[in-house]
């Protein structure tokens, strides 16, 4: 039973960690996958989408707003009011047509006695509020808000443009990151080849030295020297294998593949057909346009602050219907009405608040302009540095390739001289070490050239 469980566990582990997809990917394919799967690109896209909806929202402030209002009241309470009745005096028409009291006589006490009296009984009033409601529609239209609506709308549009430019910047940064991971993977694969070749050369030398030692032609000390070099070669090969594993996992992480995916790259460090160096122009970079938009954003923000202390004018129209307040079970209100309102607000005195806020906003605008000038100079320096890096990397590739050719010739010469007894073992080992170092330097120089080209394109706004 234990053997069965062990076998099943082994199969499952092999399925998870051992079965990995084999994919051959070019640099362009890695770039496309990185752009599709990168989280920062997704965030930039959502930010641009949000900014687009903000523009539509602020544009709606130019148009009138309509709203429905309604209130409903249900209450079982009832209020009562009784007007007391009694006898009321009467009046008759006088000679001039006016009504005069219908007096019979006047008592000595001064009280008047009318010929006729009218009798009014007590009157009861019942008030109810249940099932009372109001309903209406209202339209509001700003006429002049001191430029607040226009400034807010322009700020929203600039924010949308900034979001799109940030997407372009994120895209170039993702491409640089992808190129770094890609060419690093190529570099460690090439270094692995160099380490394997070096180990093969040292292995061959060790076999020859051991054979010479067995027949008494080589001292034991020489065998130990070669064995030390072989140990160093094995360590370098192990480091190269680990570096390949990490570089492959890093590339898988960037392009959005499982970390256990086996990726093979068709590219090698062949000399590029043409190396293009762009002119010292930073205006194509998204950062340059973003700085311009930030200055424009501060200008609109100054307008927005100023609008808070300018007059504002608005108009509103309302149409309402009211039903409720029943008296003796008959509604007292059952009609509709129309009303229009013009609202004017003119700020008069705020103890310098408006002037100081506007001055503060203008100061922020000046600070942004100074930051823009400083950032532009830094981008120009970065572009010039990238041009120098490409030039130096190109020269380093040519020099390391020549050094590798010379090291190969030197190794061949020392091998022949050692085999004929004209060179010592130490000289031969030094020639092997120099050849291995020349090969590694050549690989590193080629990787640096590819990365410098990518960074130069980004610095010139061409990526």
Image: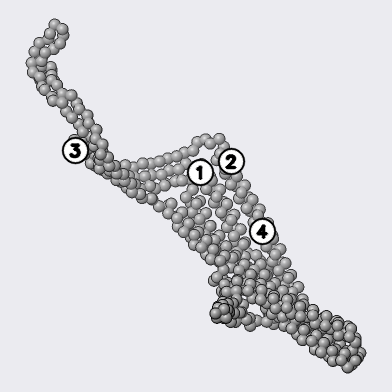
Left or right of 17? Residue 455 is right
Residue 322 appears in the picture as rendered: no
Report the residue marked by disc 3: 329
Q: Is residue 125 visible from the viewing direction of this image?
A: yes
Res 285 → quadrant: bottom right
Q: Earlier in the sequence, mark 3 or mark 1?
A: 1
Observer-nearest of 80 and 407: 80
Find disc 4 in the rendering and name its residue. 375
Instruction: Give me the C-alpha separation between circle 3 and circle 1.
Output: 52 Å
Figure check: 358 above or below 404: above
Q: Name which residue lies at 10% across and 15% down.
A: 114
| SS category of the residue bearing label 4 | helix
Q: Say whether residue 435 is left or right of residue 344.
A: right
7 relative position to 225: left or right: left
| Front disc: 4 or 3 | 3
Q: Nearer the viewer, mark 2 or mark 3?
A: 3
Question: Residue 353, percent across and down?
Answer: 56, 39
């Amino acid at each position: 039973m234990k053997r069965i469980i062990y076998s099943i566990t082994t199969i499952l582990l092999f399925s998870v960690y051992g079965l990995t997809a084999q994919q051959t990917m070019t640099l362009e394919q890695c770039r496309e996958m990185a752009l599709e799967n990168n989280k920062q690109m997704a965030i930039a896209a959502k930010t641009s989408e949000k900014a687009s909806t903000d523009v539509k929202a602020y544009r709606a402030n130019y148009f009138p707003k309509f709203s429905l209002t309604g209130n409903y009241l249900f209450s079982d309470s009832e209020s009562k009011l009784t007007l007391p009745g009694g006898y009321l005096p009467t009046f008759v028409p006088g000679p001039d047509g006016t009504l005069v009291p219908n007096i019979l006589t006047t008592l000595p006490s001064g009280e008047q006695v009318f010929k006729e009296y009218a009798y009014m009984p007590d009157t009861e009033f019942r008030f109810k509020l249940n099932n009372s409601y109001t309903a209406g529609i209202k339209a509001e239209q700003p006429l002049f808000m001191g430029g607040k609506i226009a400034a807010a709308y322009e700020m929203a549009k600039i924010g949308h443009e900034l979001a799109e430019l940030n997407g372009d910047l994120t895209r170039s940064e993702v491409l640089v990151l992808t190129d770094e991971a890609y060419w690093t993977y190529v570099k460690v694969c090439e270094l692995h080849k160099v380490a394997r070749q070096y180990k093969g050369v040292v292995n061959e030398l060790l076999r020859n030295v051991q054979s010479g030692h067995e027949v008494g032609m080589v001292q034991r000390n020489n065998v130990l020297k070669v064995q030390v070099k072989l140990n160093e070669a094995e360590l370098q090969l192990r480091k190269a294998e680990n570096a390949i594993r990490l570089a492959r996992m890093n590339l898988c992480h960037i392009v959005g593949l499982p970390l256990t995916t086996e990726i093979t790259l068709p590219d090698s460090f062949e000399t590029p057909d043409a190396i293009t160096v762009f002119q010292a122009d930073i205006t194509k970079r998204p950062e340059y346009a973003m700085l311009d938009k930030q200055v424009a954003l501060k200008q609109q923000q100054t307008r927005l602050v100023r609008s808070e202390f300018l007059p504002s004018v608005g108009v509103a129209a309302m149409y309402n219907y009211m039903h409720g307040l029943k008296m003796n079970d008959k509604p007292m209100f059952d009609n509709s009405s129309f009303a229009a309102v013009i609202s004017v607000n003119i700020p008069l005195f705020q103890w310098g608040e408006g002037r100081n806020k506007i001055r503060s906003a203008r100061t922020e605008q000046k600070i942004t302009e100074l930051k823009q000038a400083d950032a532009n100079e830094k981008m120009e320096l970065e572009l010039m540095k990238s041009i120098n890096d490409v030039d130096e990397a190109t020269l380093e590739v040519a020099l390391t390739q020549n050094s590798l050719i010379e090291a190969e010739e030197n190794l061949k010469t020392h091998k022949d001289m050692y085999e004929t007894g004209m060179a010592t073992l130490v000289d031969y080992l030094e020639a092997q070490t120099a050849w291995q170092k020349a090969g590694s330097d050549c690989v590193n120089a080629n990787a640096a050239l590819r990365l410098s080209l990518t960074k130069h394109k980004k610095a010139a706004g061409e990526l």
